[in-house]
Image (spheres, rainbow, N blue to C red):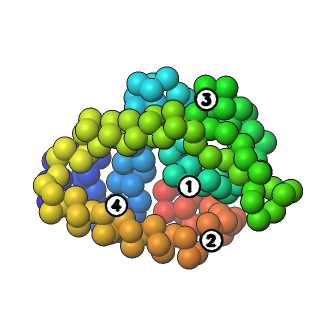
C-alpha cells in the first residue's frame, strides 16, 4: 500500500482504528469537495444534489431527511428549490392519503444521471484505483455501511471525552 501522502503516515504506535478513522475523515472531506464541484456543474447546492441523489425511487420527505441526516424542516426548503427548478414533485402517497411522497421528474432523472456520471468520470479517488481495487473497495464499503446501519450512532459521553483528553494532553 502506498502510504507516501502525509495524511496516510501514522506514528508507529498509533492504533489501527485511529488510523482508519483519520483516513475516513480525510476521505469524507475530499468526497464533499468533489460533490460540491459536481453540484456546481449542474447548478445545485451540495445539499440539493444529495437530496436528488436519494430520490432514485419516490419516498416520503421524512425518509429524505433521514438520509440527509438533517431535520425535516430543512428538507422542505431544499425540496421547494428543487421543485421550482422542475426536478422533483410532491405526490400523494397511494397507500396513505395523509402522506406526501417526493419523486423526480424526467428533468430530475436527467440531472441525477448527469451527476452520477460526473461523480465517477472526474473522481480523483477512483482514478487511482484499478478495476479490481475498486471492486474490493466497494465490497469493504458495503460491509462498513451495512454494519453502520445495524448499530445506532453512539453518543459521546463525558467518559469518552475524559479518555480522549487523557490520550491527547
Q: CA distance from mark 1 to mark 4?
A: 36 Å
Q: Nearer the viewer, residue 166 or 34?
A: 34
**Label 2 SS:** loop
- Can you tell which quarter of the image residue 33 is in? top left
Q: Which residue is mark 4?
A: 19
Vertical relation: 49 (above or below) 27: above
Q: Which residue is mark 1?
A: 57
**Label 3 SS:** loop
Q: Report if the CB atoms under discs 4 and 3 are less than 8 Å apart.
A: no
Q: CA distance from mark 1 to mark 3?
A: 17 Å
- Can you tell which quarter of the image residue 166 is in? bottom right
Badge 4: few (under 14), some or many (20 or more) residues near its Cα, within 10 Å? some
Q: CA distance from mark 4 to mark 2?
A: 22 Å
- Can you tell which quarter of the image residue 47 is in? top right
Q: Earlier in the sequence, mark 1 or mark 4?
A: 4
In the picture, measured across the screen, residue 94 lies left or right of residue 108, that is: right
Query: Depth-wise, is mark 1 or mark 4 nearer the camera?
Result: 1
Question: What residue appears at the point 40 percent right and 29 percent down from the top-left corner?
Answer: 37
Query: Depth-wise, is mark 2 or mark 3 nearer the camera?
Result: 3
Badge 3: few (under 14), some or many (20 or more) residues near its Cα, within 10 Å? some
Q: CA distance from mark 4 to mark 3?
A: 44 Å
Q: Which residue is mark 2?
A: 152
Give residue 109's position: percent from left, percent from top: 48, 40
In the picture, measured across the screen, residue 38 lies left or right of residue 8, that is: right
Amino acid at each position: 500500500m502506498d502510504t507516501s501522502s502525509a495524511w496516510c503516515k501514522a506514528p508507529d504506535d498509533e492504533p489501527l482504528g485511529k488510523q482508519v478513522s483519520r483516513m475516513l475523515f480525510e476521505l469524507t472531506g475530499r468526497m464533499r469537495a468533489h460533490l460540491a464541484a459536481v453540484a456546481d456543474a449542474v447548478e445545485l447546492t451540495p445539499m440539493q444534489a444529495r437530496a436528488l441523489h436519494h430520490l432514485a425511487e419516490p419516498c416520503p420527505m421524512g425518509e429524505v431527511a433521514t438520509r440527509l441526516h438533517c431535520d425535516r424542516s430543512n428538507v422542505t426548503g431544499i425540496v421547494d428549490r428543487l421543485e421550482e427548478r422542475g426536478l422533483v414533485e410532491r405526490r400523494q402517497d397511494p397507500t396513505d392519503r395523509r402522506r406526501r411522497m417526493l419523486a423526480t421528474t424526467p428533468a430530475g432523472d436527467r440531472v441525477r444521471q448527469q451527476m452520477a456520471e460526473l461523480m465517477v468520470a472526474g473522481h480523483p479517488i477512483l482514478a487511482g484505483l484499478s478495476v479490481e481495487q475498486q471492486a474490493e473497495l466497494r465490497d469493504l464499503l458495503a460491509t462498513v455501511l451495512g454494519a453502520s446501519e445495524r448499530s445506532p450512532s453512539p453518543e459521546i459521553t463525558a467518559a469518552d471525552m475524559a479518555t480522549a483528553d487523557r490520550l491527547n494532553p
